[in-house]
Image (tube, rainbow, N blue to C red):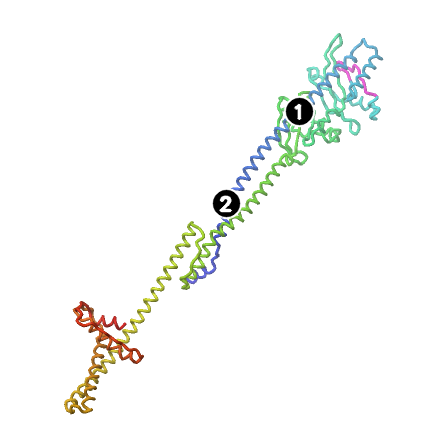
């Protein structure tokens, strides 16, 4: 039992309003968290789909532009090869025509023509190379040293590869089959073309990293010109590149590029195995998602703060009347039955307050009734004690009075009538009888008897009660005057109890 008492003494008391606040905050936090997570997830998924579609569109757009540009290069090379293959045009006129072609096609650096395995002719943009400070021998070596896929070219394919000269010139080599015509045999024409026009694809978009790669996965176009000049590898999965070359659709991938998680769209150009890609860092793509999530968190926190404040006010409005009822209950327990609480609402709390007020009023009424009953009980106890005391005294006094009365009566017989002694003896006899009557009435009053109803004269118990209290009242200078109507009808009652009522 002692252990239980100690446990009760140290029990933690958690206020009702705190429980209400915690429960409401947990509920709102759960709801807001679910809504926030659902909205953020939906937006993230939608943003992911949008970004995936967008990078695919950008990659396909870059592929279309690259295809048009490379196809134009191929057509010009075939057209220029006619001059090199023609036997009817004098050499001076040929050179003049070629100079005009280089002026009209400033991206073209060099032109080479091969019939079978033998070289049939070549041409260079001498003015452009001299202005760029590039020796002709360096260009000639690049044209001669790189072997071309003759079989694939004869099958009608177009060859495209990065032929950049580090620190000098970023260019590509494009080779195509020039068909036989007007007695001129078929030949393979190739040219070195500057990458400047294609490089504009990479510089056009500020958000996406646009790149072109040749069939070997070497960069043709990229924001970083140094990587292009160094013939660096393109950030394209070879398996994905091989797949898009065989189809006209774009493929979206998510991979790590240079340590950065990147979302990229890859599309085939359709010429020379070239692939176009458009990538964007995932952090930048999902920046709006993170921004939205941050705003949702701020809104959620603001909502939680508002809910906390409103729940504090609400719980105070609910628990305040309960606390006042608790204080009023302790006051009633101390005996302050006139305690009342204000009824501030018409709900269950208001009903409880009204019930408390009714209970307090009833307790106060019963307390007053109990005090009155207790006073009456004390008075009855006093009268009963008085009766017992009077009965004892009367019993002790009755015998001496009987002796006095007997002596007075005997002496009265021997005394001479008319003498003062005779008169005094008569007075003694009279007053002794009166005392005896008072004592007998007092004994009747103190006697505990059963209430037997009988026909009695109402005046008799009245006279007996008056005789008992008259002397005491006279000592207090109170004169008791009783005027009784004679010849009253007898009634059914108990004379002794009627006398007790009058005495009380």
Q: Residue 325: where, in percent of width, then height?
A: 44, 57
Q: Which residue is mark 1?
A: 61
Callout 2 crowding tier (Cα within 10 Å): few <14, some 14–19, many ≥20: few
Q: Is residue 347 magenta?
A: no
Left/right placement of residue 234 relative to residue 98 reads left
Residue 1 position (above or below residue 191): below
In magenta stretch: residue 122: yes
> Residue 482's quadrant in the figure?
bottom left
Above or below residue 96? Residue 485 is: below
Judge whether residue 193 can be spotted in this image. Answer: yes
Comparing labels 2 and 1, the label whose residue is closer to the camera: 2
Which residue was labeled with disc 2? 27
Relative to 394, is 490 above or below?
Answer: above
Q: Quadrant of the N terminus?
A: bottom left
Q: Residue furthest left?
A: 413
Q: CA distance from mark 2 to mark 1?
A: 50 Å
Q: Earlier in the sequence, mark 2 or mark 1?
A: 2
Q: Residue at x 58, y 32 (%)?
A: 46
Q: Which residues are magenta?
A: 112-126
Q: Quadrant of the C terminus?
A: bottom left
Kindly indicate the quadrant of the structure image that contains residue 336.
bottom left
Q: Foreground: 275 or 387?
A: 387
- Percent across and percent down for residue 106 are 79, 21
Q: Which SS class for mark 2?
A: helix
Do we see residue 144 in this rendering? no
Q: Residues within 10 Å of mark 1 (few under 14, many from 20)?
A: some
- Which mark is drawn over residue 156? none
Our reading of the magenta stretch's main secondary structure is strand
């Amino acid at each position: 039992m002692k252990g239980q008492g100690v446990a009760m003494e140290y029990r933690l008391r958690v206020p009702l309003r705190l429980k209400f606040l915690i429960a409401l905050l947990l509920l709102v936090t759960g709801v807001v968290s679910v809504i926030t997570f659902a909205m953020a997830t939906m937006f993230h998924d939608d943003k992911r789909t949008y970004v995936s579609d967008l990078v695919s569109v950008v990659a396909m757009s870059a592929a279309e532009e690259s295809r048009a540009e490379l196809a134009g290069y191929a057509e010009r090379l075939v057209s220029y090869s006619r001059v090199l293959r023609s036997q009817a045009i004098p050499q001076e006129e040929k050179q003049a025509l070629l100079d005009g072609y280089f002026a009209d096609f400033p991206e073209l650096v060099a032109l080479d023509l091969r019939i079978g395995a033998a070289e049939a002719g070549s041409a260079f943009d001498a003015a452009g190379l001299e202005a760029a400070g590039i020796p002709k021998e360096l260009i000639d070596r690049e044209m001669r040293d790189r072997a071309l896929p003759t079989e694939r070219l004869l099958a009608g394919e177009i060859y495209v590869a990065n032929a950049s000269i580090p620190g000098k010139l970023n260019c590509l080599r494009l080779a195509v089959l020039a068909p036989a015509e007007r007695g001129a045999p078929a030949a393979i024409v190739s040219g070195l073309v500057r990458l400047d026009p294609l490089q504009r694809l990479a510089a056009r978009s500020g958000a996406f990293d646009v790149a072109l790669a040749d069939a070997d996965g070497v960069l043709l176009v990229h924001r970083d010109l140094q990587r292009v000049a160094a013939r660096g590898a393109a950030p394209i999965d070879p398996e994905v590149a091989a797949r898009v070359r065989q189809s006209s659709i774009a493929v979206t991938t998510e991979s790590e590029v240079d340590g950065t998680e990147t979302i990229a769209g890859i599309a085939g150009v359709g010429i020379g195995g070239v692939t176009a890609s458009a990538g964007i860092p995932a952090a930048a793509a999902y920046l709006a998602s993170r921004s939205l999530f941050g705003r949702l968190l701020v809104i959620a926190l603001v909502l939680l703060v508002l809910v906390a404040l409103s729940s504090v006010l609400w719980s105070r409005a609910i628990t305040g009347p309960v606390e006042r009822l608790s204080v009023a209950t302790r006051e009633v327990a101390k005996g302050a039955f006139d305690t009342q609480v204000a009824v501030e609402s018409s709900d269950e709390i208001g009903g409880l307050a009204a019930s408390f007020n009714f209970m307090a009023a009833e307790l106060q009424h019963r307390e007053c009734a109990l005090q009155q009953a207790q006073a009456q009980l004390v008075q009855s106890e006093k009268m009963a004690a008085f009766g017992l005391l009077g009965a004892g005294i009367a019993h002790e006094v009755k015998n001496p009075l009987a002796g006095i009365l007997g002596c007075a009566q005997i002496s009265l017989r021997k005394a001479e009538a008319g003498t003062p002694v005779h008169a005094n003896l008569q007075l003694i006899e009279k007053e002794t009888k009166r005392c005896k009557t008072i004592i007998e009435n007092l004994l009747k009053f103190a006697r505990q008897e059963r209430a037997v109803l009988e026909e009695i004269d109402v005046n008799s118990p009245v006279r007996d009660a008056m005789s008992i209290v008259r002397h005491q009242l006279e000592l207090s200078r109170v004169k008791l005057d009783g005027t009784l109507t004679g010849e009253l009808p007898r009634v059914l009652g108990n004379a002794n109890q009627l006398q007790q009522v009058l005495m009380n």
